[in-house]
Amino acid sequence: MISKLSHVSIYVLDQDSAYDFYVNKLGFNVHTDAPIGEDGRWLTLTVPQQPDLEITLMAVKPGMSFTQETANQMREMVKNGIFGFGVFETADIHATYEELKGKGVEFIKPPTKEFYAIEALFKDDSGNWFSLTEKKALTKQKRIFVLSLNNTHKQSRKWRLHLGRYCLRFTRMCLNKPGSNKRLLVMV
């Protein structure tokens, strides 16, 4: 049975330039940098907080994986930003955005609040584009419910209101005359 994903690939136009971008601008760690074959290079990086997933920077060139024609087509797709894509997470998107922008990373969208997170988009030196997100910045959308309570006793009663995955418990004190209606505003 499969237990985990250990490697993913990002196709790049030039491994030396990609090395500089991912290591010196994004702050990734080099895991493996070794020659392979006659003129190949096995270059894998890791994100500092995720060392067990290796990102392989694969050069798009004729050889083991590509014919000349396929390599040319792939290079055009990567260069035009229509092939590579990924999502990176950060705890503080505004600080990370400013830091990366200061290092020369090209952003195509500044941090923007979306329904799923705060997101910025950037491109690597080859043309691959990535989403940079901060998930924790989202606040729960407030929902308002009005619950009508029929006040029939002068004693305290405990009520439960189930709303999806939320369960609210509240105590109602009967302060009005018996038989009067009360309304309670509940925000979740």
Image (tube, helix red, strand yellow):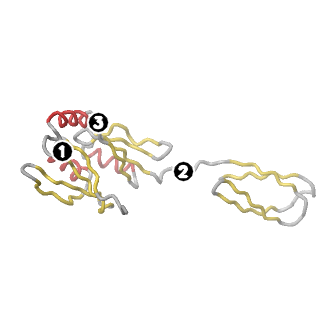
Residue toward you, 51 or 142: 51
Foreground label between 1 and 3: 1
Residue toward you, 2 or 4: 2
Mark number displayed over residue 179: none
Residue toward you, 44 or 74: 74
> Which residue is label 2 attached to?
139
Looking at the rendered structure, the secondary structure element under dot 2 is loop
Looking at the rendered structure, the secondary structure element under dot 1 is loop
The residue that appears at 38% across and 52% down in the rendered structure is 89
The residue that appears at 86% across and 61% down in the rendered structure is 174
**Quarter of the rendering containing residue 1:** bottom left
**Mark 2 or mark 3, earlier in chain:** 3
Q: Amino acid at mark 2?
A: Thr
- The answer to the question of whether label 2 and label 3 lie on touching residues, with beta carbons closer than 8 A, is no
> Which residue is label 3 attached to?
81
Looking at the rendered structure, the secondary structure element under dot 3 is loop
Q: Position of residue 82 (x, y in %)?
A: 30, 35
Mark count? 3
**Quarter of the rendering containing residue 165:** bottom right
> Which residue is label 1 attached to?
65
The answer to whether residue 29 is left or right of residue 138 is: left
In the image, farthest residue toward the front: 1
